[in-house]
Image: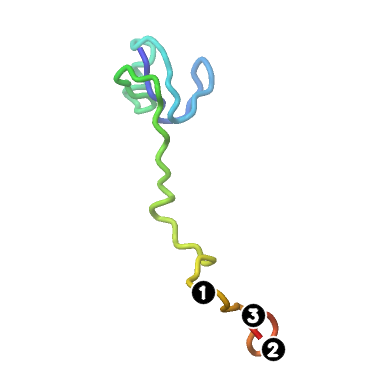
């Protein structure tokens, strides 16, 4: 039977999240119960792991709404930016 890896672990080899592991159900029952593996519907293609950081990441400070031609230089000294 095929199982999807939910948490990284070492069995007969090292398994990463999203891998498909083929094993006897009785052999890995403790891993299914513990949430390490989940039964697949017979599909052999793993889905991509979800990236939770994308939802909560703050907007990048470098992403500003400067219009073309606007500089970010030091206006007090006249260095950089539009002169």
Q: Which residue is mark 2?
A: 77
Question: Which dot, 2 or 1, sits closer to the camera?
Answer: 1
Considering only order in the chain, which callout, 1 or 3, is on the residue closer to the N terminus?
Answer: 1
**Image marks 2 and 3: residues in contact by CB distance under 8 Å:** no
Q: Name above or below for residue 80 compared with residue 43.
A: below
Which residue appears farthest toward the left when viewing the image?
41
The N terminus lies in quadrant: top left
Residue 63, x across and y down, in percent? 50, 65
Viewer-side residue, 75 vs 68: 68
- In depth, the one of 71 and 30 nearer the eye is 71
SS class of the residue under badge 1?
Answer: loop
Residue 9 in the image: above or below residue 22: below
Few, some or many residues within 10 Å of mark 3 (<14, 14–19, 20+): few
Question: Disc 1 designates what residue?
Answer: 66
| Residue 44 shown left or right of residue 64 in the figure | left
Query: Residue 32 or 1: which is nearer the viewer?
Result: 1
Q: Are marks 2 and 1 in contact (CB under 8 Å)?
A: no
Q: Residue at 50% of width from left, 70% of height from top?
A: 64
Residue at horizontal 35%, vertical 19%?
30
- Residue at image position (48%, 26%) is 9
The residue that disc 3 covers is 81
Identity of the residue drawn at 49% across and 18% down: 11
């Amino acid at each position: 039977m095929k199982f999807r890896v939910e948490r990284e672990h070492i069995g007969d080899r090292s398994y990463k999240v999203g891998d498909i592991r083929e094993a006897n159900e009785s052999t890995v029952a403790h891993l299914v119960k513990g949430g390490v593996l989940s039964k697949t519907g017979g599909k052999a293609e793993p889905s991509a792991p979800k990236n939770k950081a994308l939802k909560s990441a703050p907007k990048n400070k470098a992403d500003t709404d400067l219009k073309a031609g606007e500089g970010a230089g030091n206006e007090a000294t006249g260095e950089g930016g539009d002169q």
